[in-house]
Amino acid sequence: MLNSPAMASPVARRLRANLTYAEQRLWERLRRKQFNGAHFRRQRPIASYVVDFYCHEARLIIELDGGQHSEQNEKDAARTRELKSLGFHVIRFWNNDVLENMDRVLERIAEELRTR
């Protein structure tokens, strides 16, 4: 299910090197256990996917969706269902939410960390 760092895919490496602006902004807040002491990883291979952010202790996956996701709702829903079937909890935010309302995004993440 969860691929080890030694098995990190070339896709994951490329995505880590080319974060979107919204991903960069959220990563600044999540990295180095600075957010509620939770350890997040970015662009983490899980099953056949590379998820945007992952907290192992909470089995929490955070996905950021840009404009292209408005046209792939069913694909995203299937991805979320599969990850949930593997025991992960998935929350999604639009890039605009991260860029325009970071405080609310962080509140939501904190709520999930408390309940997990």
Image (cartoon, helix red, strand yellow):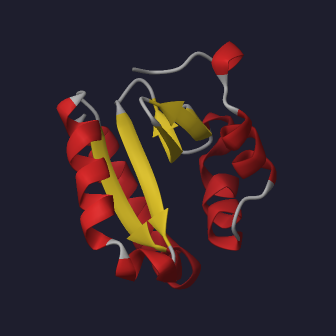
- 21 above or below 79? below
User: Residue 102, position in %: x, y?
Assistant: 52, 73
User: Residue 87, position in %: x, y?
Assistant: 23, 28
Residue at 61% x, 35% y: name it.
Answer: 33
Image quarter in which the N terminus is found: top left
User: Residue 52, position in %: x, y?
Assistant: 54, 50
Number of marks in picture: 0
Image quarter in which the C terminus is found: top left
Answer with left or right where residue 96 lies relative to residue 26. left
Which residue sits furthest right? 17
- Taking depth in this image into account, of 38 and 71 the one nearest to the observer is 71
- Determine which quarter of the picture holds residue 39: top right
User: Residue 5, position in %: x, y?
Assistant: 66, 19
- Taking depth in this image into account, of 104 and 85 the one nearest to the observer is 85
Residue at 63% x, 70% y: name it.
Answer: 22
- 112 above or below 84? below
Look at the image and tell me whether residue 36 can be seen: no
- 52 above or below 10? below
Residue at 44% x, 34% y: name it.
Answer: 48
- 67 above or below 98? below
Look at the image and tell me whether residue 58 can be seen: yes
- Taking depth in this image into account, of 13 and 74 the one nearest to the observer is 74
